[in-house]
Image (cartoon, grey):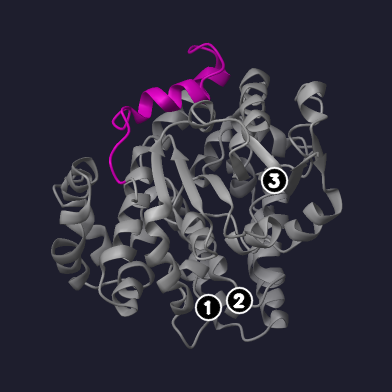
Amino acid sequence: MTDLAPDAGYGSTKAKLKTALLQHDALSPAGLSERLFGLLFSGLVYPQIWEDPAVDMEAMQIKPHHRIVTIGSGGCNMLAYLSAGPAKIDVVDLNRHHIALNRLKLAAFRHLPSYGDIRRFFAEAGHASNIQAFDLFIASKLDRETRDYWNGRDLIGRRRIRVFSRNIYRTGLLGRFIGLGHLLARLHGVDPKELVKARSIREQRQFFDERLAPLFDRPVVRWITARKSSLFGLGIPPQQFDELARLSEERSLSSVLRARLEKLVCHFPLKENYFAWQAFARRYPQAHEGALPLYLQESRRDAIRDGAERVTVHHASYTELLSGKAAGTVDRYVLLDAQDWMTDAQLNDLWSEISRTAAPGAMVIFRTAAEDSILTGRLSEALLNQWDYDASRSMELGHRDRSAIYGGFHIYRKKP
């Protein structure tokens, strides 16, 4: 059965995030920065995940016997993996808003009557009927905590579920950050939405070179991107900022961000890159405009619906979940960028549990803000020597990640 029941610590997002994030004294500049990020991260951050599940799935080569553990975030990755028919998926996240979103998505795929209902609910905006669909088909199938969450009220008294009658992708920390980016661009005479008028890679490149790239030379943009808090809206914690800043002599991320935006805009046709649609049009493409995320494509719907009972969603840390598993029982691990946040002790604790629970042929995939693997020089030799790093495949697939937000994609395989 799908585990939609809450774990024991479901309500304590702030406490769990505090353990994961805080590494410095509260009154130090670094400590204040960590606490500000933690405050922002305690709400909904990612209504959509910003790692490319198609790249993940090509790396993992999911088989019917595979047991997967993944971080939940916006839930798009978990549902995409599920469409490949693995035996089991455990989803973990420290953020209760992500937990509620993951459980809602699973319930929607199980209980909404048709693919059209799924598409309206998650791929389109402005459908008041989504609220009726929730009340009729989904609410009664949710556990009490998740149902109470979506029936709960926001700061101005609206039911949380009503976000699906508007545009959920304009909400959350990331959605609001993108909105502020649009505002800043318009103040400098550039409307980012005009990108979606491009009809070729050449026109996309022209728009970037002539309209977007010059913005990164503006003094206000350089000033903003020199501050750690400026990127909290991307879900980039202080530790990741420091890694990225090492790539720039001036400690401003304007040049790094320009390079990442260039990849997003110029390296993939718009019809094939829904990440660019969300960043620039602030919506998904319509059927004649381009492809939806894997999990929202009609050909995937039945596999996700029929396999939803094989997913368990946990409000827990990755290490906490693995500590309760038997040795040799996990085939695939998806860490997203979580290791960029970790101390050396946390990193070694995590990989101790990964190495213990890894089945023969197990694989770990993750992303990093910078290009290099986070493990080099930080993971103990005893742990690192149990794994092979596939550098060439990692680089190949990293170049194909359409979200373009990360510097590196990494694949580790358990040694025989």
* Neighbourhood count class around disc 2 (C-alpha, 10 Å): few under 14, some 14–19, many 20 upward: some
* Neighbourhood count class around disc 1 (C-alpha, 10 Å): few under 14, some 14–19, many 20 upward: some
Q: Disc 2 to disc 1, how far (Cα)?
A: 6 Å
Going by the image, does 24 lie left or right of 416? left
Q: Mark 3 points at which residue?
A: 363
Q: Would you place residue 267 above or below residue 326 in this image?
A: below
Mark closest to the chain's N terminus, 3 or 2: 2
Near-viewer residue (136 or 415): 415
Q: Do the residues labelled 3 and 2 touch (CB within 8 Å)?
A: no
Q: Mark 1 points at which residue?
A: 291
Q: In which quarter of the image is residue 371?
A: top right
Residue 19: say if magenta: yes
Near-viewer residue (18 or 297): 297
Q: Would you place residue 294 above or below residue 234 in this image?
A: below
Q: Position of residue 120 (x, y in %)?
A: 31, 74
Label 2: which secondary element: helix
Q: Where is residue 149 in the image (x, y as percent from the top left)?
A: 22, 44
Near-viewer residue (6 or 130): 6
The amino acid type of the residue labelled 2 equals: Glu
Tag in front: 3 or 2? 3
Near-viewer residue (220 or 365): 365
Q: Would you place residue 272 above or below residue 410 in this image?
A: below
Q: Are marks 2 and 1 in contact (CB under 8 Å)?
A: yes
Residue 92: say if magenta: no
* Neighbourhood count class around disc 3 (C-alpha, 10 Å): few under 14, some 14–19, many 20 upward: many
Q: Residue at x 84, y 48 (%)?
A: 391
Q: Mark 2 points at which residue?
A: 272
The amino acid type of the residue labelled 3 equals: Met
Q: Where is residue 178 in the image (x, y as percent from the top left)?
A: 47, 56
Q: Which residue is drawn at 30% across and 54% down?
A: 104
Q: Disc 1 to disc 3, how far (Cα)?
A: 29 Å
